[in-house]
């Protein structure tokens, strides 16, 4: 079974530029999550989708971050414009259902904002 | 407010000995706990979980203990192997929700 796919794996941009990350979850997983992991911290949930609907985006900085999952499968996360403090690893995870279901993580995209 | 804490940023253990990783939480509403392992340049992978109705769960070399009164859980790895060297995150959530709250991680190094 293929795991969660993410691209790109690494990205370096200058502040005020825009960037987009892509995630393809495990086939059949209805729930998709985007996390931000800053160096030395644990992953922090940014947004959760159930199929193509947003369940929770309370911790998403909506002035600069946006995410979509138009067809209920793959998803994109965008930052526009980027700030220095956005430097982090962006992890995508998926699960069959919400709740206590195990979340399966992709390898992440490491973003460096200069 | 850090609801899930892993106070030891790093731990070194000799191969074959026991590794004990600790995790404390403050929110008494949490009733499901998980441990994830993370290798460099990879995403976290699920290791073991425990519900608050239990105080112990075992899977091979890995055992998780939960002390609800102390709001503390620990992961025991016996015997430790060099391949166990990774960062370990504990996560907590409230039943019926999806929201994992992760700790800051403990880097385990198993010395051959």
Image (cartoon, coloured by chain):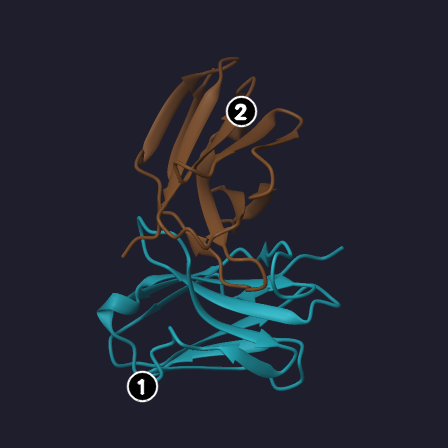
Chain colours: A cyan, B brown
Task: Check residue A63 in the rendering and tell me which mark sits there, or answer none.
Answer: 1
Residue B51 location in percent, x, y? Answer: 59, 45
* Residue situated in front as seen by the camera: B75 or A62: B75
For label 1, the crowd category at 10 Å Cα-Cα, with few meaning under 14, some 14 to 19 and many 20 or more, is few
* Distance (Cα) linking label 2 and label 1: 44 Å
x and y, in percent, of residue A12 in the image: 34, 67
Q: Nearer the viewer, residue A68 or B75?
A: B75
Residue visible at 53% across and 13% down in the picture: B16
The nearer-to-camera label among 2 and 1 is: 2
What is the secondary structure assignment of the residue under circle 1? Answer: loop
Q: Residue at x 61, y 56 (%)?
A: A100
> Which one is nearer the viewer's eye here, B34 or A77?
B34
The quarter holding residue B87 reads: top left
x and y, in percent, of residue A8 in the image: 50, 66
Local SS, label 2: strand
Q: Are marks 2 and 1 on the same chain?
A: no
Count of numbered badges drawn on the protein: 2
Determine which residue is flagged by label 2.
B77
Using the rendered view, name the quadrant where residue A53 is placed: bottom right
Question: In which quadrant is the C terminus of chain A drawn?
Answer: bottom left
Chain ID for label 2?
A: B
**Can residue A114 be seen in this snapshot?**
no
């Amino acid at each position: 079974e293929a795991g969660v796919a993410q691209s790109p794996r690494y990205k370096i941009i200058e502040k005020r530029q825009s960037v987009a990350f892509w995630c393809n979850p495990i086939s059949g997983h209805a729930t998709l999550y985007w996390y931000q992991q800053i160096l030395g911290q644990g992953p922090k949930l940014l947004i959760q989708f159930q199929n193509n609907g947003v369940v929770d985006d309370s911790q998403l900085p909506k002035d600069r971050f946006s995410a979509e999952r138009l067809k209920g499968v793959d998803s994109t996360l965008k930052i526009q414009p980027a700030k220095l403090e956005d430097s982090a690893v962006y992890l995508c995870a998926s699960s069959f259902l919400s709740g206590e279901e195990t979340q399966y993580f992709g390898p992440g995209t490491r973003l460096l904002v200069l | 407010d850090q609801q899930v804490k892993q106070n030891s940023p790093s731990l070194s253990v000799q191969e074959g000995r026991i590794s004990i990783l600790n995790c404390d939480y403050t929110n008494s509403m949490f009733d499901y706990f998980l441990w994830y392992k993370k290798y460099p340049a990879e995403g976290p992978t699920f290791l073991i979980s425990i519900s608050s109705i239990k105080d112990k769960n075992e899977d091979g070399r890995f055992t998780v203990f939960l002390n609800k009164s102390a709001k503390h859980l620990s992961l025991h790895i016996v015997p430790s192997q060099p391949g166990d060297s990774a960062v370990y995150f504990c996560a907590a959530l409230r039943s019926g929700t999806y929201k994992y709250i992760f700790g800051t991680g403990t880097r385990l190094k198993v010395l051959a």
